[in-house]
Image (cartoon, grey):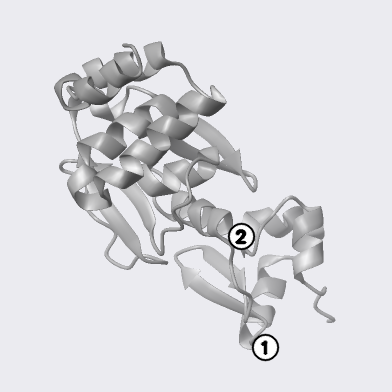
Amino acid sequence: MKTPPLNRAKLKMAGLGIYFRPRDLEPLAVSFQDLQRLVAAGKVDKVGRGLYRLAATQADELETIAMVASAVPGGIICLLSALRIHGIGTQAPHEVWIALARKARKPARPVTRLRVVRFSGAMLTYGIQTHPVLGVPVRVTSLARTVVDCFRYRNKLGLDVALEALREVVRSRATTIDEIVRAAEVCRARTVMRTYLEALGQ
């Protein structure tokens, strides 16, 4: 039996990136048996449990984030990776930043490089949105929450990154000062951000 072809253009027409699950291929009339033949032929790589990608294809950043969200559904995309989803800042992280609950197990065999931070209490629920990325529902911190988190984790990211994000969102009006202040209060970062918010007239 001839195996249906699978390439980047065909995946894109189906709203998929280079990463996919077997059920994602059903609209393309590619069965699980077809998928296994593509793996055997070296045209598709299995990169994780139930997760595949086209062989010898370089993923872009959003595709990698979508892959992580598929592989770690309980995670929250945050910090530098969240800024990329929101289109803010100039940082291009070499790993995906993801938050997990304090007691959640870190992925033993991550499908790409991860930077894991831990959230607890209100931080696990406040300002968490779901964005579709290449057909994958991705849990991500809101823009206001992301800016606040950049200040909370300024020792990991650098204060310049946090200031750049704050200035850009204020200048572009992508979110409001009130939303940032509220997020800072909930996340107990108002004291940390006071000087910078006062400089903005808040």
| Left or right of 181 on screen, residue 51 | right
Residue at the (48%, 33%) spot, across then down: 168
Rendering coords of residue 97 (x, y %): 35, 51
Residue type at the position of mark 2: Phe
Circle 2 crowding by C-alpha within 10 Å: few under 14, some 14–19, many from 20: many
88 is higher (above) or lower (below) than 97: above
Q: Which mark is residue 41?
A: 1
Where, quadrant-wise, is the N terminus in this rendering? bottom right
Q: Which residue is mark 2?
A: 20
What is the C-alpha distance between the residues marked 2 and 1? 17 Å
Residue at the (27%, 25%) spot, across then down: 196
Q: Is residue 128 visible?
A: no
Q: Secondary structure at mark 2?
A: strand
Rendering coords of residue 82 (x, y %): 44, 42
Q: Secondary structure at mark 1?
A: loop
56 is higher (above) or lower (below) than 198: below
- Do tag 2 and tag 1 residues touch (Cβ < 8 Å)? no
Residue at the (49%, 21%) spot, across then down: 175
- Which of marks 1 and 2 precedes in the sequence? 2
Residue type at the position of mark 1: Ala
Picture quadrant where residue 128 is located: top left
**Foreground mark, 2 or 1?**
2
Frontmost residue, 67 versus 182: 182
